[in-house]
Amino acid sequence: MKLSHRVVAALCATSIIAASPLAKTAVRSARAAEAATEDQLLWGDTHLHSSNSTDAYLFGNRTADPETAYRFAKGLPVVHPGNRARVQLDTPLDFLVIADHAEGLGALRYAMERGVPSEELGFFARLAAPVVLWWLRGKLENGEGLSIMQQVLTAQEDVRSAAETPRDMAPPGGAAMARTTWNEAILLADQHNVPGRFTTLIGWEWSSRPGGATLHRVVFTSADASVAKNFMPFGSDQSNYPEDLWTWLDETAAATGADFVAIPHNSNLSKGFMFPAEERLRGTPIDAAWAEQRAKWETVVEATQIKGDSETHPTLSPEDPFADFEEFPFYSEPNPPAYDPKPADYVRSGLLAGLAIEERIGFNPYRFGLIGSTDSHSGVSSAEEPNFWGKFAMDSTPESKPNLNGAPENGPNGWTMSASGLAAVWAEENTREAILAAFKRREVYATTGTRIRVRVYGGAGIEPGDELATDIAAVGKAGGVPMGGELRSLTSAPGFLIHAAMDPMSAHLDRVQMVKGWIEGGPLRERVYDVAWAGQAEGKRKPDAQGRVPRVPDTVDPTSATYTNKHGSATLSAVWTDPDFDPSVRAFYYVRVLEVPTPRHSLRDAVALGIDPAETGRALSIQERAYTSPIYYRP
C-alpha cells in the first residue's frame, strides 16, 4: 500500500527509525520512492482590509472595496483609493483573505453610500441619522478621519481592567448593515474563488485592543458562502478575551461544520500580553485547558507585517546581530506611553515561553508556525519595496508619508511602515481546503515581501550530502518531517536539510541561519547559528572566533536607490546537525534566510523627492528575509 507523504513524515519522527542504522538506510530508500506527492508553493496575504473596515474608510479608502482587492491580488490593474493612480502587482498572488474588522463591519461605508437602514431605528434616531451623516461627511471631506479614529481608540491605562468591558462599536442600525455587508462579502468571495488558480478564503479580524494592547487575530475558514451565511463574525465588541473567541470557534465549528484558523498579529504591540508565560489576560494562571484550546485554533502567528517585525527585539536577543529589523515602537492609542518591549511581545521569546509552559503543565500553547501578511488598509496588497503603496490610502505618495494628519507627535508615519509581508504555503493544491490544511499542520513560512523559496526538513534520516539531491522534497520527506513538524525521543542529533533559493525578481541570498531555542535546567536559552552563506565554498567569508560570519557588503547607492547582485548566492543549501543537541531537552528550530542589502522604500522616496535620506528617519537599506515555521523536538 502506498503511504501518503504525511504518514511517511510522521513515521520518520519516531525513535524506532533512529534506533538502527541498517534499518534507517532500508527505510530511507523505500520512503524516497514513496514521497511522490509534489506540493505547490503558494503565495498569499491573509490580512487585507477593504473599505468595509471602519478605520480604512476613515483613513481615506472610500473606493477600494472587496472587488478591487481581489482584482489587484489577481494581478489586474486597479485605481488606488488615495492617489487615484493605476497600480498593479508584478506577480499575482495565489490566495487572499480579506480580513475586515468585525467591529462595525461595513457600517461607515454602508451609511455613507446607502444611508442608515431605518427598520432598527427608533423615532428620534431616525430624525438624528441624517444630521449625524451630514456631520461625518463633512469631517471626512476635511481629512479628519484619523482624528475621529483617535477619539474612538481612547485607551485605559490598565490593560486587564480595560479588557473586562468590551466596547460596543456598532452605530444605530449597525447590525443590519453588518449582516448585509457580510452576506455580500462572502458571496463575492465565492465568485472570485477559482480552485487551482486563485483561492479566496472567507475571513475577518477580531480586533481586541484593551488599554492600547494589540491582541488582534485574523480568522479565516475553508467554508464557502453557503456555510458562512449561518454565522456572523465574532468581534471584540462581544469579548476582549482570546479564549472567548476560541470558544466561539469551538461552538460554531460544531454547529456548522466549518473549520477555522485564528492568527495573532502585531504581537510587538501587545504590551506583554500576546504570549504570556504565567497568567492569561483574565489574571488567572495558564492551565492545560487554556493551552490546548489556544493550540487547537492558533496554529500560526503573523511574524511580520506593515506595522513592524515581530520575530525578536535587540533587548530580548542581544547576541543576535540581525535582531534590529524593522522595529515599530508605536502603540496604537492617543498619547501613547514610551515603547517598552517585553518577552511576551515577540515570536522567539513566545516560542521559548511555550517550552517552559510545557515543562510546567505538560502542554505547549505556543507550538505555532510563522507567516507574514500586509495588514494593508488600502485594499491593495503590496509588500514589495519598489512597489509599496503604504498602509492607508492617505500615505501612498512620497509627499504624504512624512505626516499622517492627526497622528501624535513623534508617532508613526508612512516611512516608519514596513513593506511587508507575505504568507508562503506548501500545499497539495491551490484550494481552500488544502491551504487551511497546510496552516493546520504549520507547513508555512513568512517572508518580509520577497518570494524566497525555502524548504526545511528535520529528522534522524537526514544525512550530510542530502543537500546535493536533485529532489530535495523527496529526500526530505523520506528522512524527516517538514517545517511545522515534531520530532520525538531521539537518541542522537537529527539532521536538518535546508534549501533556499532567491526570488528571481529580487536580491541574492546572504546567508541561511538556524535559530534554536531550548530549556536547560530551568533557564530558557537561544542561539543563532550561521549554517550556509555566500562565499563559504570559496573561503571568502570565514567565521570569527565566536563563530559569526561577517556581514555581506552593502552595495546600495544612496544617491540612486539602486543595488547590485555582485555579492551573495542564488541558492544556498546545507545539512546542519545541532552541535549542542541533548536528547533529554525540549527545543525548537526555525530557519532564517537573509538577502543581501537592498534599498528601503523610504530611500526610494527620498531620491524621488530630492531630499537627504536622513530626513526619513529610517535606514538606507534592509536585508529582506524569510522565517520558517519551527520544527519542534520533544524528549
Image: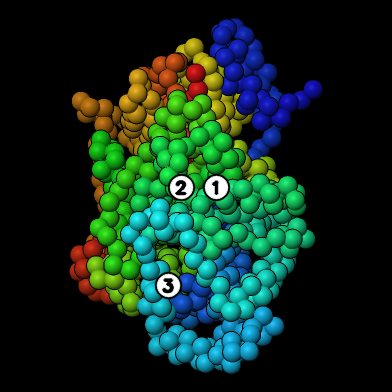
Residue located 58% across and 52% down the image: 245
What amino acid is labelled 3 in the image?
Answer: Val
Q: Report how far apart the C-alphas of labels 1 and 3 lie in the structure.
A: 25 Å
Q: Is residue 476 above or below residue 454?
A: above
The reply to whether dot 1 and dot 3 touch (C-beta < 8 Å) is: no
Lateral position of residue 457 relative to residue 335, left or right: right
Residue at point 66% right, 30% down?
Answer: 6
Q: Residue at x 51, y 15 (%)?
A: 490
Sequence-first tag of 3 and 2 = 3
Q: How is the image coloured?
A: rainbow
Q: Nearer the viewer, mark 3 or mark 2?
A: 2
- 537 sits to left or right of 489: left
Can see residue 621?
A: no
Image height of 189 relative to 159, above or below: below
**Relative side of 20 to 183, left or right:** left
Q: From mark 3 to mark 2, how far is it between C-alphas? A: 24 Å
Image quadrant where residue 401 sits: bottom left
Q: Secondary structure at mark 1?
A: helix
Pick whichever of labels 1 and 3 is earlier in the sequence.
3
The residue type indicated by label 2 comes to: Arg
Q: Upstream in the sequence, badge 1 or badge 2?
A: 1
Give me the residue at 61% from left, 48% from top.
247
* Residue corresponding to mark 3: 152
- From the top left corner, tell me how far across and down residue 272 is, in percent: 36, 47
Q: Is residue 355 left or right of residue 91?
A: left
Determine which of the numbered discs, if any, sits on residue 243 in the image: 1
Label 2: which residue? 282
Percent of width and height locating residue 553: 25, 45
